[in-house]
Image (tube, rainbow, N blue to C red):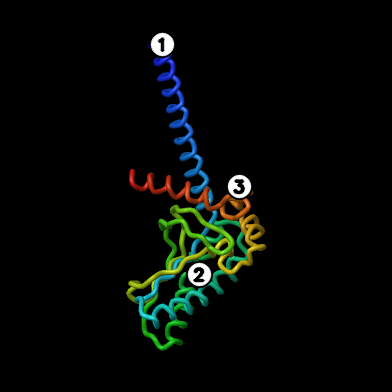
Amino acid sequence: MKRLDCRKLKLLEIALMLGAALFLTSGALALQTGDQLAEKVVRLHVIANSDSDADQALKLQVRDRVLERAEALLRQCESRQDAEKLLESRLFELRRIALEEIRDNGFDYDAVVRLTEMDFPTREYDSFTLPAGKYLALRVVIGEGAGRNWWCVVFPPLCAAASADVPASALAAGLSEEQVGLITESDGYIIKSKLVEFWEQLRNNAE
């Protein structure tokens, strides 16, 4: 009887060890996939002056103008590195466009436009999902920057892409088939993105 109990305990220990190994392996793979994806994407992040209706409406107007120009510029880019260099060289122009839109709407707020690395949570859009992680962002701060924000993906140009165009746009920007599968419905994207988010939170808490 004791031998049987010992054997059961050993089997339980082995099962727990295998479970822990699989858990850690899944975490490493999830973080690696998320990091590799983030290295190929540029987000657009627009922050309103405040949460007033007028400031929130202005945020969307500025977003549309900056997004339109940024996407036009980035059509010639084939990688995130190309996109980063081009955006860096056009930050003054993009700030001017943001300020023009602010003035055209009757406000005198300042605008700060820069490229920066930022932590983002998992975000679900109509036709794709981006897992949590640290992404390069084209950040537009209007006035005090104390209002609700808006973000999407400016490279590849997924913000306004139709559902059918998302995979092709992502592949053209250098994303792998696996990465496209992660962000689209074709590969269980919600479950995988949540897994990446869970491990990203653990990593951030450990730092």
Q: Residue furthest front?
A: 1
Is 29 situated left or right of 2 in this image?
A: right
> Relative to residue 23, is residue 174 drawn left or right?
right
Numbered label tally: 3
Kind of residue at badge 3? Glu
Q: Are marks 1 and 2 in contact (CB under 8 Å)?
A: no
Disc 3 to disc 1, how far (Cα)? 48 Å
Mark 3 or 1 closer to N-term?
A: 1
118 in relation to 71, above or below: above
Q: Residue at x 43, y 57 (%)?
A: 121
Image disc number at residue 90 = 2
The residue depicted at 49 percent of the width and 48 percent of the height is: 35
Of residues 202 and 78, which is closer to you in this image? 202
**Above or below — where is 103 with respect to 98?**
below
Q: Residues within 10 Å of mark 2 (few under 14, many from 20)?
A: some
Q: Are marks 2 and 3 in contact (CB under 8 Å)?
A: no
Q: Earlier in the sequence, mark 1 or mark 2?
A: 1
Separation of residues labelled 1 and 2 (CA atoms): 74 Å
The residue lying toward the viewer, choosing from 34 and 5, is: 5
Residue where numbered disc 3 is placed: 178
Secondary structure beneath dot 2 equals loop
Q: Residues within 10 Å of mark 3 (few under 14, many from 20)?
A: few
Where residue 82 appears, as percent x and y from the top left, is 56, 59
Q: Secondary structure at mark 1?
A: helix
Badge 1 local density, few (<14 within 10 Å), some, or many (20+)? few
What residue type is disc 1 on? Arg
Name the residue beneath numbered marker 1.
3
Residue 126 place in picture, x, y as percent: 56, 64
Residue 116: quadrant of the picture = bottom left
Residue drawn at x 48%, y 35% as measured from the top left: 25
Q: Is residue 91 above or below residue 84?
A: below
